[in-house]
Amino acid sequence: MKPSPALQNTMTWPQRFLIAAVLSWFGLLIFGPAVALARRAFAPGMGAFFEALTDPDAIQALLLTAKITLVVTISNTIFGIGMAVVLVRQRFWGRRIVDGLLDLPFAVSPVIAGLMLIILYGPKSEIGSRLESIGFPIVYHLPGMILAGMFVTLPLVVRSVAPILEEIGSDQEDVASTLGADWWTTFRRITLPTIRWGVAYGAALVVARSLGEFGALLVVSGNIIGRTQTATLYVHDQIESFQPHGAYVMSIVLATVSFCILVGLETVQNRVRQREYGAETNEDDQGAVRQMRRH
Amino acid sequence: MSSTVAGRRTSLSGELLRWSCLLYLGIVLVFPLGGVVVKAVSAGPSKIWAEVTNPFAWHAIMLSLGTAVVMVLISVFTGTATAWVLARYEFPGKGLVNALVDLPFAVPTIVTGLMLVALFGPTSTLGVVLSGFGTPVIYEQSGIVLALLFVCFPFVVRSVQPVLENLDPAEEEAAATMGASRWMIFRRVTLPALFPSIVSGAGLSFSRALGEFGSVVMVAGNRPMSTKTAPLYVYGEVEGFNMEGALAVSLVLLTCSLLSMIAASKWAERQG
């Protein structure tokens, strides 16, 4: 993108200096580290890169991350749609409390999220020990890691669907049910098509967040290689055991996937703006988008 | 508006939907939160207080608060400047910068930490130069600030940028026709309009910074009484099965980060 000559002429030296300062800061803080990581990952050559990538432990970790992400995304998307419908379309006692509680995972450190799960569901707790005795251990096993993923991504789908539901109102749904459609038909034919981009946006955020979750998983996993090791835990473990190249390669994979999701989200966001609301963006929409961007 | 909008026939399924959602919310979020409260009450306030005022815990809490404050002070300037440049000027590479602003939100935190070590760490050229000047960054407290700056970079930018873009140019133009200098216009006209969004971005950054773990683990070196932040301390205590210690520091962190989040949003609401 080249600036027009007219613009360049109107630019004063302090303005140019400001642009240069911002670009340098951005380059040093964001761009530089990303490039440095890529250089480290590819420095030993493509052969070594693929060798590190196809390491059995690395593959195991990626598979576990995929499994957790899949379960968390499906279950939190269903919950998110349901909770958004309940919050927007129903009035009940405690609705505001529920609304406030939903944002809590944004304020909780991932480590504390893990601690909360251990205290309630850990092997030393009432519930945890009972579940373990019937052969369903949670903490230090897969269910605990899924629960941790659910905790940290809980608000994302609700917060991207609820503003759209509020925006469209319930007129069309009311008409459908007056015409004799049952609630499922109404939901499937009227509500779902309207909120689909919001759902897609929220679900993509959940995928990105659970792929990259580290702190909560570290606390609730036993971190035994191959069994409860996810991709992010693998990165940590490789660094701890002085094998940085494995960590760099896995990091590049994670960063690339996250980056693609980010680019996809921008596209979805533009679609939501253009298709659902028309070309003009409104304040609520921007607020919602900003809210989504937080995590 | 009654309990459901669509009337009697859907009310049973509506109730069912509500209770299943609340149950899910309970299992994932509310019951664990309740568990923490029960545990804290059963440990007793004096035990909790003793754990918080233990010198190692206290240092970790103060370090987290201090690094977060320093980060916010820097981020407020760089974030506003970045938003300003993105909203007001055209320059080569603007599209790329605009797209990459959100990168810190997308990249996993542990990868962030590794990136910073790769550029600033002792095995990189830049790291060697920094150590040569006697100011190594990685494995020092300044490294923690650096990690927080990266992780929280988008907050202020993304909260100020839309406000700047929607700002009515009439007021600035009026000030200019009355002979105000550029700096005067910025300070007296533009800045007051931006202030609420800057504060709300700062509040979100602070709240996020207090709990940051993944990137700090990589860059901090994890030395007690030196570079061990509160989340690292909590993790250490969990690993050492000192649940009360972990719980006590968690309660302090949670309170601070909730308060700063609520304060920033309330304040911005009142101003806006």
Image (spheres, rainbow, N blue to C red):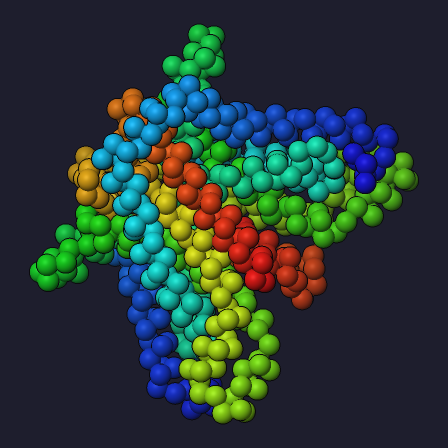
Examine the rendering and report whether any part of residue A193 can be seen.
Answer: yes
Q: Nearer the viewer, residue B245 or B127?
A: B245
Residue B12: image quadrant is top right
Q: Is residue B67 left or right of residue B102?
A: left
Q: Nearer the viewer, residue B101 or B73?
A: B73
Residue at left 72%, top 53%? A167
Q: Is residue B19 left or right of residue B231?
A: right
Q: Residue furthest right?
A: A179
Q: Nearer the viewer, residue A294 or A196?
A: A294
Vertical side of A17 occupied by B54: above or below:
above
Examine the rendering and report whether any part of residue A293 can be seen.
Answer: no
Vertical side of B258 occupied by A3: above or below:
below
Relative image position of residue A218 (x, y in whole percent): 34, 32
Relative image position of residue A200 (x, y in whole percent): 59, 46
Quadrant location, the N terminus of chain A: bottom left
Q: Is residue A10 left or right of residue A89?
A: left
Vertical side of B125 occupied by A150: above or below:
above
Relative image position of residue B27 (x, y in whole percent): 54, 25
Residue B82: image quadrant is bottom left
Residue at left 42%, top 47%? B207
Residue at left 51%, top 63%? B196
Q: Residue furthest top?
A: A133
